[in-house]
Amino acid sequence: MASYQPARTSSPRISQDVIDPDDLTLDDLDNDDPLASTHDTAPLNPSSNFLPGEDRLSHSTLDESVWTTLQRDILAVWRKMLAVLYPKFTFKKWPDATDVLEAGGSLGSARTKVIGEWDLWGPLLFCLALSTLLSMCAKSEQKTEVFAGVFAMVWVGEAVVTMQIKLLGGNISFFQSVSVIGYTLFPLVVCALLSALGVYAVVRVPVYTACFLWSLAAGVSILGGSGVVRNRVALAIFPLAIFYFGLVCLCLVS
Amino acid sequence: MSSSHNNGYDVVVDVDDEGDLGHTDLTDLEFHQSTYSTTDPSAGKAGRSSARSPRTAGGPSNSTSTPSGKHHLFTLSFYAQYFDVDTSTVLHRCRSALIPRTNFLDIIDGNPDLYGPIWITTSVVLMLFLASTLAQYFARFGEEGDGGGKRYTYDFTLLSGAAGMMYGYTFIVPAALWVVLRWWGVESANLLELACLYGYANLVWLPVAVASVSPITILNWVFVGVGLASSGLFLFRNLYPVVSATDHRTAKILLIVVVALHAGLALAIKILFFAHGSPVGTKDPNMTHPVEPPKSDGRLF
């Protein structure tokens, strides 16, 4: 809000200038300086009562504790996960191509903005969790292969699915799509956790189906506003479904 | 027809009617040409006109070997022409691969896609893994009754083995066949059409895999036999016109090799993935599989 201050005060002064330019005094010139007006009257950060030059330092991350940094990053991952995983549409009515293409929400909405600032921390976290949990369930002599296989499957799958959408004419950002798909792995991590705990098969099938649908419903949001032609939307979704289905299969049989 | 957000397109023609398929193909062709120039920003400013030249000038049957397409090998738009299909097109191709009425190459109509081969094969790999694991699980469950103290653990190498076998078969065999046909001077042979043919021929293994979960051995053999007969006949019928361009003896040998390889694949699927009840499986259902698939794949060639 502080940055609006000079602009607002200057416009009447300019209109004064037009009427009588000779009225200009040295005080008016001082008021013109945005820095001077802010550090005199309203500091940028009201909480800091240090020397005026130091309030810029309070925005830097150099002197904060490691825990604060970590906390901020974890919070960012958490916020993005919520934004990605919040269901775009329920499966009460089977969504058609138009629904899918508009699933991303309007471009200016807060959720789109959160998703737009992609990062790969969340995908890495979920990928590692998935690989670790699944390798824990595997045979003792195959733990390494399972870990490596799942890890590769996740990243290669994300890349291939994204490339496929681009090849079908979708205009999406590669890493943003990879990031979103990575965040939608969360329901599958839940499945892997249940598998690691040794839940019975009777419970697994419905829960895992629900998780699969949840992931898929969240994952198709990368198609929102991508410009894929309507009669190709199903072709673009199918690889995504296969990707989730493969991982759910691994969780199911673990 | 009611698309309000078709950015960049003037007309969106909805071609979901199943009746007029000839018409569909025509509209597809015209429509997608505009797709590449408008939606793909990576087409580049430098060579947009030459990027489209293989499609317009080279003709669909020859676009892989057109030299002007070579330097666009690393752009996305170069590969986009191999994914130039709509949902209805893919579904129609799948249907005509399962229930063949006319020549499949006529249905492809000079526009072979890689979408079908890649994703059908991926589905088959997954279904083989899942069905095979479930079959083993049920077989184990039946043997031990109470499940025993030891939990059943799946075999991850079944997945990698299935992937190696199916991807290998679907893409190496057509490539080899293409090289051989080219060697014999068959100009009409097209690598992508062959890959497309083999890819769609894989489709029949999906229902076979699902059906093979059942622990009844004789049923498994029947299902795999039906799958082999269906896809083998499909391959034979569609490869025959292409292969017969060579002299009579070569054509015969090539067709026999193709069918034998396909039978080998079917046998490998049966023995490696649905081995319960067959002599290989009863000895040690977990440990004989891991090494086999890649090895048998290599032995086939």
Image: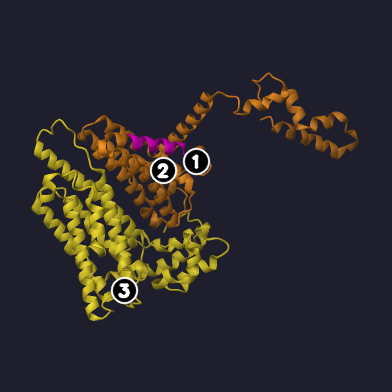
Chain colours: A orange, B yellow
Q: Quadrant of the N terminus of chain A?
A: top right
Q: CA distance from mark 3 to mark 2?
A: 42 Å
| Residue to which mark 2 is pinned | A181
Magenta span main SS = helix
Residue A118 lies left or right of residue A145; in this view the side is right
**Same chain for marks 1 and 2?**
yes
Label ID, residue A118: 1
Q: Left or right: B138 with respect to B27? A: left
| Picture quarter with the C terminus of chain A | top left
**The quarter of the displayed image where residue B64 is located:** bottom left
**What chain is tagged by disc 2?**
A
Specify the segment rendered in magenta.
Answer: A114-132
Res A48 → quadrant: top right
Q: Name the front one of labels 3 and 2.
A: 3
Q: Is residue A254 magenta?
A: no
Using the image, tell me which numbered label, if any, was put on residue B181.
3
Q: CA distance from mark 1 to mark 2?
A: 11 Å
Question: Can you give x and y, in whole percent of width and height, for residue A253 in the image?
Answer: 24, 40
In front: B26, or A207?
A207
Dot 1 alpha-carbon crowd within 10 angstroms: few under 14, some 14 to 19, many 20 or more: some
- Residue type pointed to by label 3: Leu
Q: Can you give x and y, in whole percent of width and height, for residue A112 in the image?
A: 49, 41
Residue B238's disc number: none
**Circle 2 — which element?**
helix
Any part of residue B93 in sight: no
